């Protein structure tokens, strides 16, 4: 073990700072603000959170927890259920913490993922008492080498009063060299971010440490929790084909080539399944510039379709994770992991001309998208990076199945119950029914495309009836709505368990 630690902790000044998780947990006091590494269940700290859960059995305390995005069960399930977390941001995806958020036991700050570093830099989030960061190594010159994500770790390390490092001896040594740590300067004194290509490297292979701020190093051997994505199904395969045909049409008119533009795919099963559709297509020499690399990206690398991929985290199912990490040298020169304020940076997204594919909970007949709130009030996961990408991408595409709960819910409604992405940021809607290209269209021009191409047949007549009545009621306003009926579908769902109006049930 000593030999292994010497290889992992190559800075001699820090070798004397190894402590137990229990000792590190004892430093955390009631009311503290913690910045924790981790992004979509990848590269998150594990043993200190578990020690905090044990501490909570004999001591009452609450802390605010800020991360890159969602974390594994150690924080977003066990710490949440132990009642330790007072406030959480900026994204979560575990049922344990979601239930606490929706019961009001935890305050949740939902935010665009590219904005968080700036909020820390300005002191709006903070002051951060402890940055708790997972690492695979610490170099001779004091660079912390992250593991499977970067997220907000660089800004947490830079701004926190003190640092606890979780040195994960189970993580691959081969991760060293994959990261590109570039932290922009203060606003007003900041140069343009010099990235012209997806594969460009801008910074260091690790996060610079102020050695005096490192209070302790805790040894961990717990690997990331596997992702919870489910395999593609017949409907997601159909959605993928609709998307590919849309892109083929873009090529025919000269807007794209077969290598497209860099691809971004959001977190989740549907987006992952749709991206996988490229595997058996004619598209080649593809690049990925995203926030998270899920299973489909590595399947596309294996198929020779993707030549390079940039993100802030790698989040894989157990099966694909075993394949990738068991043969990591095959992928290392095709990957780079960056801070999320770079992976989600609007300046770069706009410059590279991304094709962005994210998932919607519901869409309305004018193209507004709800990504976060079930029936307008119950938080699902959060907006994540979808806003960063959709607003700034060359193509902002949203995918969703046209229905949910066995047909009791239509994913296309008269008016979304919560707006995350306005009609101005939504270019294309894709369901298993078809594609609606909304670019350059006025609101009333979008209605027919969305209803006829994207809505499940069981709900088309009902939606047309709503629009026609609203159009007549308003005398043909720019965006016709009957405000008394606009959310009637959600009201009907709450009262009767379905959005179907009995008048339109055949």
Image (tube, rainbow, N blue to C red):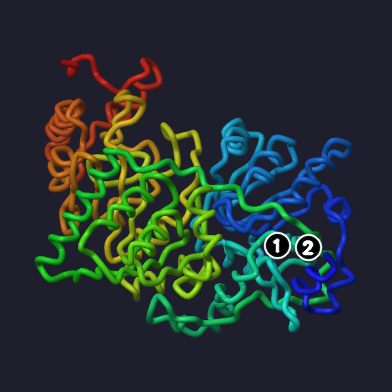
Q: Vertical placement of 235 versus 421: above or below?
A: above
Residue pushed farthest left?
Answer: 253
Residue 24, image x, y percentages? 85, 56
Q: What residue is rendered at 87% in x and 56% in y?
A: 20
Horizontal side of residue 81 vs 335, given as left or right: right
Q: What residue is rendered at 53% in x and 66% in y?
A: 328
Residue on which disc 1 sits: 133
Q: Is residue 183 visible?
A: no
Near-viewer residue (257 or 116): 257
Question: From the image, which quarter does the N terminus lie in?
Answer: bottom right
Density class for disc 1 (Cα within 10 Å; few <14, some 14-19, many ≥20) is: many
Q: Earlier in the sequence, mark 1 or mark 2?
A: 1
Residue on which disc 2 sits: 164
Task: Say which quarter of the image contains residue 196.
Answer: bottom left
Element under label 2? strand
Residue 242, image x, y percentages? 20, 49
């Amino acid at each position: 073990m000593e030999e292994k630690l010497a290889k992992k902790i190559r800075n001699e000044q820090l070798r004397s700072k190894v402590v137990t998780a229990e000792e590190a947990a004892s430093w955390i006091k009631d009311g503290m603000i913690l910045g924790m590494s981790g992004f979509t269940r990848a590269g998150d700290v594990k043993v200190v959170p578990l020690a905090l859960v044990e501490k909570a059995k004999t001591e009452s305390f609450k802390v605010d927890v800020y991360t890159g995005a969602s974390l594994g069960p150690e924080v977003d399930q066990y710490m949440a259920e132990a009642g330790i977390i007072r406030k959480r941001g900026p994204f979560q995806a575990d049922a344990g913490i979601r239930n606490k958020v929706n019961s009001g036991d935890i305050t949740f700050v939902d935010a665009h993922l590219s904005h968080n570093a700036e909020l820390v830099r300005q002191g709006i989030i903070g002051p951060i008492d402890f940055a708790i960061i997972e690492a695979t190594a610490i170099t001779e010159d004091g660079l912390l080498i992250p593991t499977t994500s970067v997220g907000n770790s660089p800004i947490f390390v830079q701004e926190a009063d003190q640092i606890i490092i979780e040195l994960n001896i189970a993580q691959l040594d081969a991760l060293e060299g994959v990261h590109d740590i570039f932290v922009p300067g203060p606003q007003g004194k900041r140069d343009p971010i010099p990235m012209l290509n997806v594969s460009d490297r801008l910074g260091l292979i690790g996060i610079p440490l102020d050695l005096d701020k490192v209070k302790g190093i805790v040894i961990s051997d717990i690997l990331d929790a596997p992702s919870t994505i489910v395999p593609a199904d017949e409907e997601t395969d159909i959605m993928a084909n609709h998307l590919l045909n849309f892109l083929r049409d873009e090529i025919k008119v000269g807007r794209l080539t077969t290598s497209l533009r860099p691809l971004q795919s959001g977190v989740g099963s549907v987006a992952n399944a749709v991206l996988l559709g490229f595997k058996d297509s004619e598209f080649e020499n593809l690049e990925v510039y995203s926030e998270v690399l899920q299973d489909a990206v590595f399947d596309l690398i294996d198929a020779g379709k993707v030549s390079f991929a940039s993100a802030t985290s790698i989040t894989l199912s157990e099966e694909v994770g075993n394949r990738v990490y068991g043969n990591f040298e095959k992928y290392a020169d095709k990957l780079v992991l960056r801070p999320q304020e770079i992976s989600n940076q609007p300046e770069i997204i706009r410059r590279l001309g991304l094709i962005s594919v994210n998932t919607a909970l519901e869409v309305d007949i004018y193209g507004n998208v709800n990504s976060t709130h079930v029936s307008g009030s119950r938080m699902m996961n959060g907006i994540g990076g979808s806003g960063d990408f959709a607003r700034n991408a060359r193509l902002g595409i949203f995918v969703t199945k046209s229905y949910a709960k066995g047909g009791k819910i239509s994913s296309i409604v008269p008016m979304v119950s919560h707006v995350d992405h306005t009609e101005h940021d939504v270019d294309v809607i894709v369901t298993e029914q078809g594609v609606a290209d909304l670019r350059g269209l006025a609101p009333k021009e979008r209605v027919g495309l969305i209803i006829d191409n994207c809505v499940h047949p069981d709900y088309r007549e009902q939606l047309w009836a709503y629009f026609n009545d609203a159009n007549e009621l308003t005398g043909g306003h720019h965006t016709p709505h009957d405000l008394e009926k606009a959310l009637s579908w959600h009201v009907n769902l709450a009262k009767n368990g379905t959005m179907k109006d009995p008048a339109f049930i055949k």
